[in-house]
Amino acid sequence: MKTKLIVIAVTMIALIFAGCAKPPEAEIASANSAMETLRAAEAETYAPQALKMAMDTLNAANSAKTEADGKFALFRSYKNATALYVSAEALAKSAGEQAAAEKEKMRVMVMEMQAQAALQLAAADTALMKAPVGKGNKADIEMIRADLANIRGSLEAAQRDIDAQKYAMVRTKIQSIMDRTARIQEEIAKASAKKK
């Protein structure tokens, strides 16, 4: 009888320890992998709010796991941490998709702006060639010619940024190129008026 009680007690203890919760290693790995993918997708630039939500959820999951780790083995439960890791992974994947969509929108916008800037620059070149050059405006025309050469260089640099897929950064550069070209077109008109 005593032997049966010992066997039953040992079996019960073994079952209790077998039932003790284990950390959700697979969920942790999946959530961390999804976060790494987010960094590669440039979510910080293209989907910052979605990235923040995913990071906050991952941080909450890590806190829940740490809290569970600190409990006595028999009372340890990773249910909350597991759910948070799964949620963080889902949010990270969603943020990655959002970042990809925003990046594509930005790419299309930048390509349109680049084409418009090139047309504007070509129009300024044409206007400069047609501008009458004389004693009263020769220095102005030379300055404008140098400015246009600088703008052409800036547009070539913008193309390198586009090739490197730095769309958010290059958008500002192209807008600046367009603004500078518009001012130069005004200067060409003024220089032409001086000659007349």
Image (cartoon, rainbow, N blue to C red):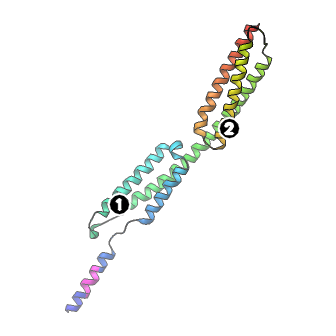
Mark-to-mark CA distance, 1 and 2: 47 Å
Q: Say few, some or many: other residues with alpha carbon within 10 Å of mark 1 (under 14 / 14 to 19 / 20 or more).
A: many
Q: Quadrant of the C terminus?
A: top right
Q: Is residue 20 magenta?
A: no
Q: Quadrant of residue 179?
A: top right
What's drawn in magenta, residue-wise?
7-13
Which residue in the structure is indicated by mark 1? 65
Q: Position of residue 28 (x, y in %)?
A: 43, 61
Amino acid type of the residue that numbered disc 2 sits on in the rendered structure: Gln
Considering depth in this image, is 173 or 66 the residue closer to the camera? 173
Q: Position of residue 139 (x, y in %)?
A: 72, 14
Amino acid type of the residue that numbered disc 1 sits on in the rendered structure: Lys
Dominant secondary-structure state across the stretch colored magenta? helix
Report the residue at 34% width, 69% height from top.
21
Q: Is residue 117 above or below residue 89?
A: above
Q: Quadrant of residue 23?
A: bottom left
**How many numbered marks appear?**
2
